[in-house]
Image (cartoon, helix red, strand yellow):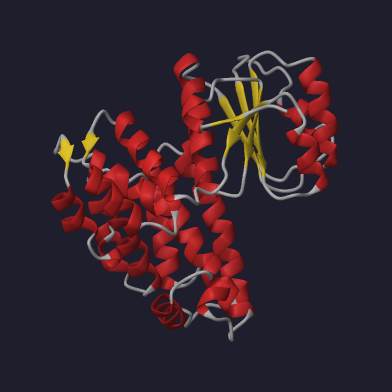
């Protein structure tokens, strides 16, 4: 069985599997592969397959083009047809074609994929405190910054329930002018969970306060917040609202949040319906693609997503 590796250790391989339940780590894995490809080939085609994979789709996308540009193909809904095509692809890789597959859950098709000799990138949830501290340390090493041990622990405690939040906080701190991050700095920025810049942006949007949401967005982007976790935060909020709409009597534990968060979520439910949330999910998916390289102006696409959320006309 192939050992899983961190997204930080991923290499540019013909076939890579993003293995595990954590979508944020899968996003980081995708970004790592995309960055490696762009370093070798500044111009390349990118294809995102969100819907059910169709037989032969991989080979159609990989067929030679006029300019023979490399291709990055990301399949998010694997099925038996994909497994069969990947078996052929593994035996005879197509030159300058790189395939990523999102694999989560215990479906038979995912077990079949896990048996392959592809590069497997670990996207399992970080449940232990030691794993979260290791993630924080690695983030700051990547930015060539240092962070005090007590500051690491405060970050891990503050963002214990969502790795995307933790990653966004690390990014914001590491992009500051301060070389050494201490406890006081972390406490000043994130001592209260509601102070987290990325989540203030999203909270303002779901509260219908478009002007504040856009202002906070510009400030967040100026201070180094990555657009990808921001979109992930909108997606998380949409999933929470969808759970509440489908089960209005759901408890905080049913949705995976604290009681005060559930009370807040119920206040944000006004104006949303199953239909409007379905539309929002579609817009989130397209925005996610845009901020991951599909657009030259991802900030604009992110603004449009927040405007749609704020006006509840997505």
On the picture, is 93 further left or further right than 219? Answer: right
Query: Residue visible at 59% across and 86% down?
Result: 249
When the figure is inspected, residue 161 is found, relative to residue 135, above or below; the finding is below
On the picture, is 203 further left or further right than 109? Answer: left
Answer yes or no: is residue 308 visible.
Answer: yes
Residue 270 in the image: x percent, y percent?
Answer: 47, 83
In front here: 163 or 238? 163
Label count reads 0
Query: Residue visible at 49% across and 43% down?
Result: 290
* Image quadrant occupied by the N terminus: top right
Query: Residue visible at 16% across and 37% down?
Result: 180
On the picture, is 106 further left or further right than 227? Answer: right
In front here: 145 or 1? 1
When the figure is inspected, residue 266 is found, relative to residue 22, above or below; the finding is below
Residue 228 in the image: x percent, y percent?
Answer: 43, 46
In front here: 41 or 198? 198
Residue 141 in the image: x percent, y percent?
Answer: 31, 30
Quarter of the figure with residue 160: bottom left
Query: Residue visible at 39% across and 39% down?
Result: 134
The residue positioned farthest toward the bottom in the image shown: 249
Quarter of the figure with residue 177: top left
Answer yes or no: is residue 297 visible.
Answer: no
Residue 285 in the image: x percent, y percent?
Answer: 56, 52
């Amino acid at each position: 069985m192939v050992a899983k590796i961190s997204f930080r250790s991923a290499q540019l391989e013909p076939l890579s599997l993003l293995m595990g339940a954590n979508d944020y780590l899968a996003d980081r894995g995708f970004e790592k592969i995309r960055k490696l490809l762009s370093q070798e080939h500044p111009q390349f085609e990118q294809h995102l397959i969100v819907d059910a994979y169709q037989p032969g789709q991989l080979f159609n996308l990989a067929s030679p083009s006029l300019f023979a540009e490399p291709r990055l193909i990301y399949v998010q809904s694997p099925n038996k047809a994909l497994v069969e095509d990947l078996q052929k692809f593994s035996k005879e890789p197509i030159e300058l074609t790189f395939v990523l597959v999102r694999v989560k859950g215990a479906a038979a098709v995912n077990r079949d994929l896990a048996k392959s000799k592809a590069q497997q990138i670990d996207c399992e949830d970080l449940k232990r405190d030691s794993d979260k501290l290791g993630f924080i340390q690695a983030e700051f090493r990547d930015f060539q910054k240092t962070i005090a041990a007590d500051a690491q622990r405060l970050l891990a405690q503050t963002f214990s329930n969502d790795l995307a939040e933790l990653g966004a906080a690390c990014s914001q701190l590491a992009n500051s002018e301060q070389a050494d991050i201490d406890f006081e700095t972390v406490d000043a920025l994130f001592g209260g969970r509601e102070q987290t810049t990325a989540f203030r942006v999203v909270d303002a949007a779901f509260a219908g306060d478009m002007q504040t949401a856009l202002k906070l967005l510009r400030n967040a982007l100026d201070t180094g917040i990555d657009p990808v976790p921001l979109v992930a935060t909108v997606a998380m909020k949409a999933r929470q609202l969808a759970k509440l709409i489908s089960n209005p009597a759901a408890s905080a534990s049913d949705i995976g949040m604290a009681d005060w968060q559930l009370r807040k979520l119920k206040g944000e439910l006004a104006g949303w319906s199953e239909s409007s949330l379905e539309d929002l999910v579609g817009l989130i998916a397209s925005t996610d693609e845009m901020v991951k390289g599909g657009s030259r102006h991802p900030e604009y696409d992110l603004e449009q997503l927040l405007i749609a959320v704020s006006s509840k006309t997505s």
